[in-house]
Image (spheres, grey):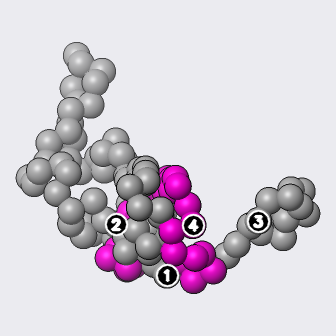
Amino acid sequence: MLEIACTRYPDIDFRLNNCSQLQTVDDGYFDLLISNYVVMDTLNLDGTVNAFHRVLKPNDTAILIFSHPCFDFSNSDSSADRPQRHFHWDFPYLEARKCIDQPWAHFSSEFIWFH
């Protein structure tokens, strides 16, 4: 995918990095960092957050989009007379934590994600 992107958009500086290190990015390089559904799947959450902090300029912005609760149906319910799905958590929704979900559908291994 990186090769295709570089071919199609030669004026953009594409890089391949481990998100918990961002080894090709200098300190304070970005004034905006957007992480869309990345942080929930990293194996090194602390390293990733530290790398994000390192590459941001001081007092600038990081937008981190985590897993949306609509994807975890083990903590929700609905009824035939109400089309909405209602979610319930046994911990504060914004609490930082490692979660492990059991396989579902055609998957055969656990889902490890960070909230």
Question: In this picture, which residue range is highlighted in magenta?
Answer: 22-48
- Mark 4 vs mark 3: give the one in front: 4
- The reply to whether the magenta stretch includes residue 35 is yes
Q: Looking at the picture, which amino acid does disc 2 mark?
A: Trp
Q: Quadrant of residue 2?
A: bottom right
- Mark 2 vs mark 3: give the one in front: 3
Disc marking residue 69: none
Q: Quadrant of residue 104?
A: bottom left
Secondary structure beneath dot 2 equals strand
Q: Looking at the picture, which amino acid does disc 3 mark?
A: Asp
Where residue 21 appears, as percent x and y from the top left, is: 49, 81
Q: Nearer the viewer, residue 47 or 55?
A: 55
Tell me: residue 3, above or below residue 18: above
Left or right: where 85 falls relative to 22: left
Q: Earlier in the sequence, mark 4 or mark 2?
A: 4
Disc marking residue 13: 3
Disc marking residue 21: 1
Q: Earlier in the sequence, mark 2 or mark 3?
A: 3
Left or right: where 1 falls relative to 27: right
What distance separates the C-alpha of mark 1 from that of mark 2?
Answer: 19 Å
- Mark 4 vs mark 1: give the one in front: 4
**Residues packed near mark 3 inside 10 Å, few (<14), some (14 to 19) or many (20 plus):** few
Q: Looking at the picture, which amino acid does disc 4 mark?
A: Tyr
Q: Earlier in the sequence, mark 4 or mark 1?
A: 1
* Residue on which the image places disc 4: 29
